[in-house]
Amino acid sequence: MENDGGGSALVAGGAGFIGCHMCERLVARGWRVTVIDNLSLGRKENFASLRQSNQFSFVEGDVTDRAELDDLFARNGFDTVFDFVANSDIARSHADPAVDIVNTFDTTVGLLDTMRRHGTRQIVFASTSAIYGEADGAISESHGPLMPISHYGAAKLASEAFISSYAHNYDMRAWIVRFPNVVGDRLTHGAVRDFARKLLANPERLEVLGNGGQIKPYLHADDVVDAILKIGDSTADPVNIFNIAGNTRCSVKRIAEIVVEEAGGTAEIVFTGGDRGWIGDVPNVEYDISKISGLGWQPRLDSEGAIRAAARWALDNL
C-alpha cells in the first residue's frame, strides 16, 4: 500500500474483533489511525493499549450516516480505508434480511462513495468464504459461479462487485481478502466463544448445533493481520483478491473437544443433529491458498492451535 508507515487510515469497525488487531499493527507501523464504530459488536476495551497513543483516535458513530462520514473524511484526509464493518450474525439476518443489506452492503457503498468524493484511493475490504456458497473441493479465487447461501455472503459479494467498479471507474486500488473463520483474543462471536460461554454456565454439559461434522479452516486474528499487510506490501493491481487460510481444517466436534479440554475436560458433548448449525451455514469449506502462499506467507498457528489459543482467552475473559 502506498504511504505505508506514514499514512492516515480510517478503520471502519475498528472496535471489533479483527479491526482492533489491525489498529494495533497499523499504529506500530507508524500510521495515523482513526476508528469509527457504533459499538453494536465492538468494544472500546478492545483497543485499550492504544488510548495513550497520539497516533490513534476513536469516533463513536455509524458508517451509514453519510453526513458524519463526510465530516470525518474532510477533517482527516485519509489515504486508506480498512472496511471491517459487517453483520456477523447469519441467523439474525435470516430473520431480517435488512440487517445485512444495511450493515454489510450499504456500509461499504457509503464508504466507497465518500472515498470518491474526498479523493481517498485505497481500500482494504474484509470479505469471506461465504461468498462461494457450497462448493466442492478446494476453492481458489477464480472459483465460479459464486452462489452464496446466506444474506451475509450475498452482501459481501455485492460489496466486492461495487469495490471493483469503483476501483476501475475512479482510479482506486483495492485489496479484497476472503477469509473463513477467524478466532483469537477479543473474539465477539463464533463457536469458540459460544462453547466457552456455555461451559462457564454449565461445566457438565455442552450442546453443539449440528452433528459436529462441519469442517472449515480457522485462522488466528494475528495471522489474518499479517496476511493482509503482506498482501498490501506485495501487490498493486487495481483490484487484488486473495483467499487467506492455512493448510489445515478443524471440525466443530473437534472445536468442542478442544474447548472442553481447556475448561478441564469433564463436560459431556451433546449434538443437536443435522449437517449444519443454522440456515445459511456452509458445513464444508476448503481453500486453495496457493496464491497467497506464492507471496511467502504462512500462518504461525494451524487451525487447532488457533482454536486452542482462542479457547484459553475466552474461558479466562468472558
Image (tube, helix red, strand yellow):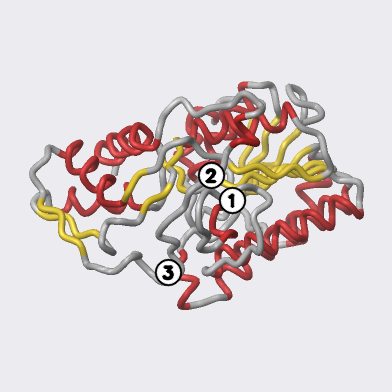
User: Which amino acid type is shown beneath numbered disc 1?
Assistant: Asp
Q: Report, in whole angstroms, how far the alpha carbon at label 2 lies from the one at label 1.
A: 6 Å
Identify the image quadrant of the N terminus: top right
Q: Residue drawn 34% across and 38% down? A: 307
| Horizontal side of residue 316 vs 141, given as left or right | left
Image quadrant assignment for residue 133: bottom right
Q: Residue drawn 61% across and 47% down? A: 140
Query: Between residues 203 and 42, which one lies in front from this camera angle?
Result: 203
Badge 2 or badge 3: first in the primary sequence: 2
What crowding class fits label 1: few (fewer than 14 Cα within 10 Å), some (14-19), or many (20 or more)? many
Please name the residue that numbered disc 1 is placed on.
37
Q: Is residue 46 above or below residue 139?
A: above
What secondary structure is marked by label 1?
strand
User: Which amino acid type is shown beneath numbered disc 3?
Assistant: Ala
Question: Are the two marked residues, 2 and 1, in contact with CB atoms closer than 8 angstroms?
Answer: yes
Q: Report, in whole angstroms, how far the alpha carbon at label 2 lies from the one at label 3.
A: 22 Å
Please name the residue that numbered disc 3 is placed on.
91
Mark seen at residue 15: 2
